Amino acid sequence: MNHNRIRKFFLFLLTIFFSFSIAGETVFADTSPIIAVVEKVNGTATVVRQGRTISAKIGLDIYQYDTLRTGRDGSIGVIFNDDTSLSLGPESILVIDEFVFAPRQGKYSIALRMIKGTVAYFSGLISKLAPDSAHLETPTASIGIRGTKFVARVEGE
Amino acid sequence: MRPWRRVLFFWILLFLLSGCGAHRAKRDLIVLLPDAEGKRGVVTVTTQGGSQILDKPGYAIEIEDFNQPPIAPQPVEEKEITDIFGPALSMLPDPASRLILIILYFEPDTTRLTHESKDLVAEILRTIKSRKSDEVYVVGHTDLVGKEAYNTGLSSRRANYVRDLLVSSGIRPNTLFVSFYGKARPLVPTQDEVPEPRNRRVEVIVR
């Protein structure tokens, strides 16, 4: 009898826990805007979002805090909302720490973090509207980007 | 030390050194590329040891270590660029041009467009109409001459002047989004009270 009550109580707790986590996720998806979209994929390329790994396909939406990863044979190209384009070569990891393109609030910011691999980058509108607001961090350096096209290789650890 | 031991020691030393050499050859590398618009871009590379500016396309900065300053820009051969960055570069999407930015400049302390900027108004109208855009941002700014409150007003008058100009040319008012920032968001950072033509502007962004 007592045993049964404990089981019921745990089921109740579990139900509450899951309903909260589902609700939380829905809220997150609604409030965080899409910041970029996958334009090209070759071989193995994934997007890591809130601990989950999604295989990258053309047309996949990208959100702030997403991590882009490519495998040994993989590469990926994305276009951000402000027309900034970015691509990764094989065995690369890039974290999108911040991307804000909000002309109505006058807010512009790009903060990317390259863990390892190769990246190609071509500035969009943010670099024209707020020249000092785009940055790429690597394990060894901070790269300030002022309206340009460049490539970088990061050896990682 | 016996001779054969000395030889062995020498070989081990050589092996270790060559290992180091191979490792050091693969440094972090940043290469500036020419962009399609032929504009001069600039990349600033900063480590804990110092900073280097990269402003010539085809030149590269290498980083040996995070607490060493970056190595000064050196020219890179095109073959090396394709060898290292070929896969990444082949996946770089074309500039999408989903957005068009046109900047209008103003005479000091007025809502009068500069001579060159007057001609751009027709281009803005063409762009909005050909794209059938229903999302146009009109963003007003001033340079750093004068008080903050005054400049906020001036940037508002400039933005609304451009808005009214577009409306009187047949653009629907509910597609135009006006905002203004006075002297708070200069395009070219200057000291206070410095006149700067490139900061006296209204940005028109057409989606």
Image (spheres, coloured by chain):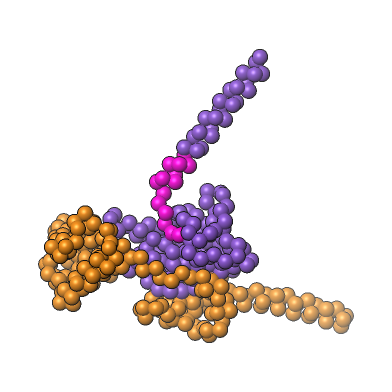
Kindly identify the residue that appears in the image at 39 percent across and 78 percent down. Answer: B36
Q: Give how far across and how far down residue A118 sits, in percent.
A: 55, 69
Q: Return the residue nearer the eye: B145 or B87.
A: B87
Kindly identify the residue that appears in the image at 17 percent across and 66 percent down. Answer: B145
Looking at the image, residue B49 sits to the left or right of residue A134; the answer is: right
Res. B105 in view: no
Residue B201 part of the magenta segment: no
Kindly identify the residue that appears in the image at 49 percent across and 34 percent down. Answer: A20
Q: Which quarter shows the C terminus of chain A?
A: bottom right
The hue used for chain B is: orange
Q: Which quarter shows the N terminus of chain A?
A: top right
Q: Give how far across and how far down residue A54 sits, in percent.
A: 56, 53
Kindly identify the residue that appears in the image at 48 percent across and 59 percent down. Answer: A59
Q: Return the residue nearer the eye: B143 or B112.
A: B112
Res. B202 in view: yes
Outermost residue, top direction? A1
- Quarter of the view holding residue B28: bottom right
Q: Return the residue nearer the eye: B105 or A53.
A: A53
- Quarter of the view holding residue B126: bottom left
Q: Is residue A30 above or below residue A58?
A: above
Q: Is residue B161 above or below residue B45?
A: above
Q: Give how far across and how far down residue B37 sits, in percent.
A: 36, 78
How many numbered dots are placed on residues in this image? 0
Residue A34 part of the magenta segment: yes
The hue used for chain A is: purple
Q: Give how far across and how far down residue B180 sits, in percent.
A: 21, 58
Looking at the image, residue B161 sits to the left or right of residue A32; the answer is: left
Q: Which residues are magenta?
A: A24-37
Looking at the image, residue B102 sits to the left or right of residue B59; the answer is: left
